[in-house]
Image (tube, rainbow, N blue to C red):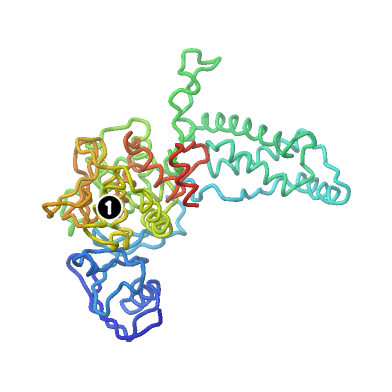
Amino acid sequence: MEATGILKLRVILDKDNAEKLILPSHPNSVQALIDAIKSRLNFTFDFRLQFHDPDFDNALCNLVKIEDLPAIASVKVVRLVELDRISTSTDDTILQTDSTDTIDSPERISRWPDVFIVPPFSYEVEHVLREGNAAFDKNGKVITLTRDQKHNILETMGEEIYKLKAYPSTTQIGKAAEALVRKHPCLKERNSDTGWEGWKNSLRYKMGNQRKKLAKAGIMDVAVNAGKRSRTNPDGASPRANIKRPRRGEVNFLPSYPSGETRETLETRRLEMVEEFKKTSAERDIPLIHQHMMPTFALRREEIVTTSPPVSELKDRWPALFHETQLYFEFQRITNQNLPYVFYAALDDYAPQLIGLYKKRKTGRVGERMEQLLLAYGKQVFKNTNYYSACLAVEEIEFYEATIALVADVDEEEVPGGVPFSPRQVFIVLEDQVVMTHHSWTDALVCLFGLIYALHLSYPEKCTGFFEFIQVVLLKLDDERKQLKPKLQTLKNELV
């Protein structure tokens, strides 16, 4: 679309603030519009846009195509969480930490890479490998390492793997071994189908031994599983019983306390935050809350993972977790992923394929509902990812007296297909109590997913496939251990 005509906008910042903006021409893309709004209104944060869609009685919809935006329109700024700098001070403001300050950062700041980066070894080993690789290139000859040289390689590789993950999967260890041999082909094994099978097994044992040493040193994410049955502890629990480790792609699952902090100092910080939440939203010291949330992350995870307290107790002790801004920060601490940004980007990418699959389903409950929706709303029902997500949410999360649920407050007397597209509110229910509310299905669903990670909750049995779809397919939070159910694996294959 070429830039044409004047564009008059009412830019909604929050429920009490809006700006009038007139652009001399209609931008040719959504990103161009975002850039223009940033420039004209001096915004320093990243955001996405929603607009009041006349096709749906001016209900808010995600702005995906610039062609959908009328010449005179209202757009809502939806801020994205990015951990860069500290911003200002309302409860809805996305606070941002200085990325140069690593003192209070989680222990792991990156996910497992697509290609494992082999670290440098000792000076002696690097020399031996350099000479060995040159000889391998000439005549294909592999080298024989001394015991100390092999120990240095395994020790260094183990430390590098641990920086990424305390409990890597067999597949991930295999990728590390493969990367080692690809970088140093002189280490290739002669009697191995892959050339690195022996290195993979050696790295597996090395990681086990390394976890034992780190557990003795008090490193939290491995010490929590110490004290199992052994020769020196014959009455302990089975070594494989109730192992606490990441199972849903978490990067920082159970970190140690920050340097210089103790349980007592972190508890003092927690109590200061509780006192702030006794104040009104306008009176709260939001920067102070944010500054305390980062260092108390380890205390919070220890409490949540090891004791599994009720949601009501967590809401009293850690009220910031139930506010959207800090919830997204917590998700980023745990997974190193920006939840709303990645979710909406993935939903936009997969929407055409998902819509095509929905259209093919002519029978069953889903087919019947989609037929009702098409009769009631026409083909516009497929136009917006917010509404498509509503279909997903209601299709799967529709049990009410439940541990986890989304429940809508609606105006309509009749709801075609059982999908209330324009609810007054959507209530997020955990353990039979409302913990958060939102104005759209999609945003409520994103918050619910964030809460499941932040509070270390299990997926509800009736919706396991639905949440695994979000986790593995949309967010790609997969530790390469999970065997997807056949239907979900088929859906994933069709989308790819």
Residue located 85% across and 46% down the image? 140
Image side of residue 422 versus residue 47, left or right: left
Camera-side residue: 429 or 389? 389
Q: Is residue 97 visible?
A: no
Q: Quadrant of residue 53?
A: bottom left
| Nearer to us in this view, 147 or 478 | 478
- 277 over 93 or under it: above or below: above
In the image, farthest residue toward the right: 139
Measured as percent of width and height from the top left, residue 309 is found at 28, 32
Please give the residue where the numbered disc 1 appears in the rendered image: 371
The N terminus: image quadrant: bottom left
Badge 1 element: helix
Who is closer to the viewer here, 300 or 439? 439
Q: Is residue 26 above or below residue 224?
A: below
Single out the residue that lies furthest toward the front. Answer: 362
Residue 412 versus residue 73: which sits nearer the camera? 412
* 417 is higher (above) or lower (below) than 153: below
Residue displayed at 37% across by 58% down:
344
Q: Residue furthest top?
A: 234
Residue 177 coordinates in the image, percent (x, y)? 67, 41
How many residues crowd around disc 1 within 10 Å: few (fewer than 14), some, or many (20 or more)? some
The residue at 28%/59% (across/down) is 381
Residue 363 at what x, y percent from top left?
32, 45
Residue flagged by tag 1: what amino acid is it? Glu
Say above or below: 158 vs 2.
Answer: above
Task: Give the residue displayed 26% in from the left and 49% down from the top.
Answer: 369
Q: Is residue 441 visible?
A: yes
Measuring from the top left, give residue 214's x and y in whole percent.
54, 33
Q: How many marks?
A: 1
